[in-house]
Image (cartoon, helix red, strand yellow):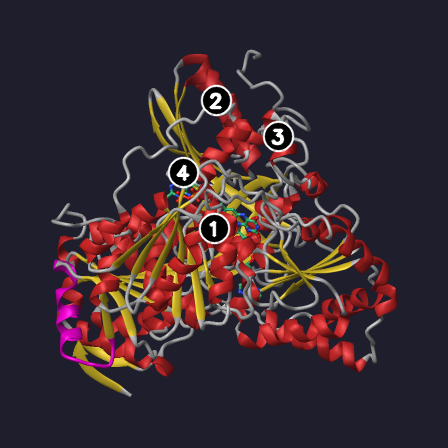
Amino acid sequence: MSREMTGAQIVVQALKDQGVDTVFGYPGGAVLPIYDELFKQNDIRHILVRHEQGATHAAEGYARSTGKPGVVLVTSGPGATNAVTGMADALLDSIPMIVLTGQVPTFLIGSDAFQEADTIGITRPCTKHNWLVKETDQLSDVLHQAFFVATNGRPGPVLIDIPKDVQFATGTYRGPEDAPALPYRPRTEGDADMIEAAVEMIETAERPILYTGGGVINSGDEATRLLRELAEATGFPVTSTLMGLGAYPASGEAWLGMLGMHGMYEANMAMHDCDAMFCIGARFDDRITGRLDAFSPGSKKVHIDIDPSSINKNVMVDVPIIGDVACVLAAILERWKARGSKLKRDRLTGWWTQIDAWRAIKCLTYKGSETVIKPQYALERLEALTRDHDRYITTEVGQHQMWAAQFLHFQEPKRWMTSGGLGTMGYGVPASVGVQIAHPDALVINVAGEASFMMTMQELSTAVQYRAPVKQFILNNERLGMVRQWQQLLHGERYSHTYSEALPDFVKMAEAFGAKGIRCENPADLDEAIREMLAYDGPVIFDCMVEKHENCFPMIPSGKAHNEMLLGEASTEGAIDAGGGMLV
Amino acid sequence: MNALNIPQGSTAHSAYSLRSSLAEGEERRTLAVLVVNEAGVLARVIGLFSGRGYNIESLTVAETDHVSRRSRITVVTTGTPAVIAQIKAQLSRMVVVIDVHDLTTEGPSVERELALIKVAATGEARVESLRLADVFRARVVDTTLRSFVFELTGPSDKIDAFVELMAPLGLVDVSRTGVAAIKRGPEGM
Ligand SMILES: Cc1cc2nc3c(=O)[nH]c(=O)nc-3n(C[C@H](O)[C@H](O)[C@H](O)COP(=O)(O)OP(=O)(O)OC[C@H]3O[C@@H](n4cnc5c(N)ncnc54)[C@H](O)[C@@H]3O)c2cc1C
Ligand SMILES: Cc1ncc(C[n+]2csc(CCOP(=O)(O)OP(=O)(O)O)c2C)c(N)n1
């Protein structure tokens, strides 16, 4: 199928043919022709954000909660530069996203024209690939290729820069099936010998662990199902990174909780002491490994990853398997059954006894209070009062994010949206809006810190405009809490610029936005206040005043090994040596 | 420094071996990268190296197949085996990259570089430069009464050696192409 159309019409047609139903964007001079075409149709819904960074994070929330790519449309110059943070965020967290930017007309490129920026140059290192389209005839091919690149292999953001004259000019539209194939062809099936080697390791392991990550969620629902089947079939314990929460259910028997810097004691100890590690769609991030030379010294390691550059990047592994999680797990289970392998519970009894001993430490224990709300308590109550809802959680970045990962429990994938790799404060508010747009009837809560919230809080106005009833659950400690914690532990309690002296009245602010504001200061009032938030049919800012100097534990200090974890405030003194300060 | 201004440590194996010495555990590799020749492709490849802190010792790029728009990039890099493996994996996953070959490890290959070297000298130095050019089989491609431009083709260390020898004789400028490399034998790349 090919037809003559303007460039702007080609953009809208390609989006429709790619199954796009929602675009997050912000107009400006260089994208006016595309906005004109959006105006004339009803298949694609446009969500007008309040800042282009908000559009990118909303698209990330949309993408992560649906498994579909998120689409962003912004103007040239400042529109494009404002979108940079979200692209860098999506690149590190493997989120499929298509960003369309307007550009000055081709004949003005390079002349410092009004709102000209070298968008391709600026975004090259923060996209998986980007294109400047100089001819209308090439536009549809590039658009279809862009969707392919964003969603295949390791997913990520792509950008298409479209000069205004290319939007106005007429060219030929070709459908997705007619776009020429790129040389980029990521491999999805694992190598048969490696799969056999992995199955042999499963059969002989005595102290195994499944270390799962965001790649399981990227791979899709089938990967989640197969992971659960594998855990069931083998009886192996399961831990996950921050990015993989929900792939294995938190209520599952084999669940050890999150691992890593602020992960569970049992998960980190099991990683350290295991003899067989099965890394499934995770990337040995430094928040996971701690000190590299002390990372799980006695184990043989299998690594399943679709991106060959993830293999042996930080940790050398014995059995690398390049492929898609779902394909590889299916092959492993198929070989496991074909070889007549059986679950050998008695071989694992000793290991589970050890794990239970670590669990008995109860590493999340904190000192409760009857007078101030402890942030952990607030999240425990939030969990208790919302776990039966159709619930999606987003977060900002900081202590509250880690507490949310520890105290909220996820039974399904795609229910937890957080900025892990880039750690972008300001991610959560727009992400919650994006999630709510995709799931209008669900309960969407952004667990926030007051400092992060203030970075993108203008998106509350978007939420009000589109009747997205997002709940902003702010754990307000009036501090840049996570940084303050580091200053306390690492910089001699010199709290350099981590106290926000002047904060707005969030209740009044909510009202000014046309939302509802609730403040809670007393632990005794908390349940009632949360119920009030849940009962309100519209956006809410919940200002939960919490303990100001609470620290987030457990914690593996930078530069330390997994078995040198800090469990509570009492044990922290002198625990981080000077070298650790470098790593942050 | 000796009379010929040859930097210290440069004559590890022979008079021709003047490349900088490698750090402990590092290796030098010549990679041939076949890419789609689209706008900005070189910036992408260079950006990968600078952004991730990889070394580039030499880089040569030109279109090699006009019809199917293919360019060949030859890059000489150094790093530990783990870093080299990362470089290859990072290059391979780029959308514009069709193929990556490690010419240093995938069997024997030929490497050549071309240089134009200008020397301004009179009297004994002028005669000496011509005599050395003959020894190196450099050709004279431009001459005036006070200068020569020599053209020299060969492995990089041969060019290094010649340039070093010209330095005390009146070296003015050097223009080098960077390394072009190809596998020996009938197979491709
Ligand atoms: C303040 C703060 C503290 C943090 N503390 C922790 C912590 O304590 N614990 C923790 O876990 N994290 C923590 N993080 C997050 C951390 O920085 C990393 O983002 C996270 O650990 C990476 O998760 P991952 O390894 O699952 O990889 P992801 O970033 O999710 O990457 C996914 C991997 O899977 C691969 N992949 C993608 N799709 C597929 C597919 N279809 N098939 C196969 N493979 C695929 C990708 O190539 C990639 O290698 C923290 C972040 C912040 C901001
Ligand atoms: C955009 C951005 N700037 C700075 C940082 C560094 N940083 C990490 S956590 C943090 C404090 C977050 O404070 P808040 O949102 O109140 O959360 P809390 O840690 O108090 O729960 C800062 C400044 C960051 N991650 N992102």
Q: Which residues are magenta?
A: A29-44
Tell me: is circle 4 under 8 Å from ligand 2: yes
Up the image or down, A350 lies above or below A145; here it is above
Tell me: is circle 1 under 8 Å from ligand 1: yes
Q: Residues within 10 Å of mark 4 (few under 14, many from 20)?
A: many
Which residue in the protein does label 3 denote? A576
Please report, as a chain letter, where disc 3 is located: A
Q: Secondary structure at mark 1?
A: helix
Q: Earlier in the sequence, mark 4 or mark 1?
A: 1
Please report, as a chain letter, where disc 4 is located: A
Residue A407: horizontal and vertical position, in percent?
54, 55
Which residue in the protein does label 1 denote? A401
- Residue type indicated by callout 4: Leu
Please report, as a chain letter, where disc 1 is located: A
Q: Earlier in the sequence, mark 4 or mark 3?
A: 4
- Residue type indicated by callout 3: Ile
Picture quarter with the N terminus of chain B: top right
In the picture, measured across the screen, residue B170 lies left or right of residue A5, that is: right
Q: Secondary structure at mark 4?
A: loop
Up the image or down, B124 lies above or below A385; here it is above
Q: Is residue B36 visible?
A: no
Which residue in the protein does label 2 denote? B166
In the picture, measured across the screen, residue A241 lies left or right of residue A208, that is: left
Q: Residues within 10 Å of mark 1 (few under 14, many from 20)?
A: many
For this orientation, the residue located farthest to the bottom is: A1
User: Is residue B52 or residue B21 the one in the foreground?
Assistant: B52
Residue A446: horizontal and vertical position, in percent?
39, 58
Disc 1 to disc 2: CB gap under 8 Å: no
